[in-house]
Image: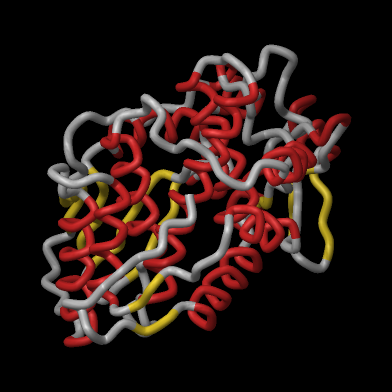
């Protein structure tokens, strides 16, 4: 079994107290059974504090959030008291893994970094070279992928190649992706897409506010001075994360990747028109919000993919393709 990662994976390190949006605030933090048992065996004053900071319900154990939905072990300096007192080995699995995600196959596990973390987003977007994927670890056991997986990996590799063709604009690359899957992205205005997103579950009022404000202007100039390379890195990220199930038709997942780039570009353009700000930080924040609201909600992700699958048009004639741009 191999562990496959993007080539920027090892560049990531939690920036802890320097993070503007700590993952220890606003999220229910689950505690796996093995870690829970270790916590129960901690003595002394910190052991008592651990027990007081944990609550259990029918879904399992998790930390009892305090004021402003802060983890009870996130101190005033923005650092984790569990790490400071016991060491990183005592973190629950979800804390150890975040912001990583995994996809599992017969011969490999693929790991990536999620955009809901601002530092991960910074690494992903502002990487100058094309994204490559490599083996992080190999246990030496030669597992064999299924024929279905082999076909899936081959097609996904073609998608990566199309998405990183730097001779073309990002819109041209997204057109090429649609030709590859034989589907046309649904022809909706930006305002219509905003309405669809507003119909989904919302967890952060800042996201809802951004959608409502941006909806007032339906067309944006997306030809900002953000280099095409950044939109390409974003597109590859979405493909790697969401084109991940060999048993599912990849069409909806590819269109979901295109939708992510489309929405983030337009929201970013709105903010650039609204105010003069640090464009780099604005883009990181939009990506973080988008990922937290959409990617980290299985329900929201699934609803959007199903909508894309149902409303996209088939395009069997790959030599007669036309993509109606909505931006």
Where is residue 289 drawn, in percent x and y? 61, 40
Dividing the picture into quarters, in which one does residue 131 lie?
top left
Left or right of 295: which side holds 143? left
Asked whether 104 or 166 is in front, the reply is: 166
**Quadrant location, the N terminus:** bottom left
The image shows residue 297, relative to residue 293, as above or below, that is below
Dividing the picture into quarters, in which one does residue 298 lie?
bottom right
Q: Is residue 95 visible in this depiction of the protein?
A: yes
Where is residue 118 drawn, in percent x and y? 51, 30
Asked whether 101 or 139 is in front, the reply is: 101
Left or right of 141: which side holds 311? right
Where is residue 153 drawn, in percent x and y? 20, 71
Q: Is residue 41 visible in this depiction of the protein?
A: no
Image point 77% across, 39% down: which residue?
A: 209
Q: Residue at the right extreme?
A: 67
How many badges with numbers are in the image? Answer: 0
Image point 55% across, 47% down: which residue?
A: 291
Where is residue 129 drawn, in percent x and y? 17, 34
Image point 23% across, 79% down: which residue?
A: 149
The image shows residue 314, relative to residue 36, as above or below, that is below
Asked whether 50 or 25 is in front, the reply is: 25
How are the residues colored?
Answer: secondary structure
């Amino acid at each position: 079994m191999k562990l496959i990662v993007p080539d920027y994976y090892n560049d990531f390190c939690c920036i802890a107290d320097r993070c503007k949006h700590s993952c220890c605030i606003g999220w229910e933090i689950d505690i796996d059974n093995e870690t829970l048992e270790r916590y129960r065996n901690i003595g002394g004053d910190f052991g008592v504090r651990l027990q007081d900071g944990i609550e259990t319900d029918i879904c399992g154990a998790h930390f009892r959030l305090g004021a402003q939905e802060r983890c009870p072990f996130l101190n005033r300096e923005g650092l984790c008291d569990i790490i400071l007192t016991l060491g990183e080995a005592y973190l629950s699995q979800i804390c150890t893994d975040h912001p990583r995600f995994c996809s599992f196959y017969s011969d490999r596990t693929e790991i990536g970094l999620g955009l809901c973390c601002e530092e991960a987003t910074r690494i992903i977007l502002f990487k100058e070279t094309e994204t490559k994927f490599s083996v992080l670890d190999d246990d030496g056991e030669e597992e064999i992928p299924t024929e279905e997986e082999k076909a899936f990996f081959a097609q996904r590799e073609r998608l990566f190649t199309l998405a990183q063709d730097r001779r073309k604009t990002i819109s041209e690359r997204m057109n090429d992706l649609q030709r590859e899957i034989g589907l046309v992205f649904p022809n909706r205005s930006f305002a219509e897409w905003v309405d669809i997103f507003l119909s989904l579950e919302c967890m952060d009022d800042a996201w809802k506010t951004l959608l409502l404000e941006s909806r007032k202007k339906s067309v944006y100039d997306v030809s900002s001075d953000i280099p095409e390379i950044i939109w390409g890195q974003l597109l590859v990220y979405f493909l790697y994360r969401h084109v991940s199930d060999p048993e599912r038709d990849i069409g909806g997942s590819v269109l979901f990747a295109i939708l992510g780039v489309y929405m983030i570009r337009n929201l970013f353009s709105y903010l650039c028109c609204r105010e003069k700000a640090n464009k780099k930080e604005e883009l990181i924040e939009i990506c973080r919000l988008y990922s937290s609201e959409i990617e980290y909600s299985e329900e929201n992700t699934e609803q959007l993919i199903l909508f894309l699958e149902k409303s996209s048009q088939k395009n069997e004639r790959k030599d007669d393709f036309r993509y109606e741009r909505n931006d």
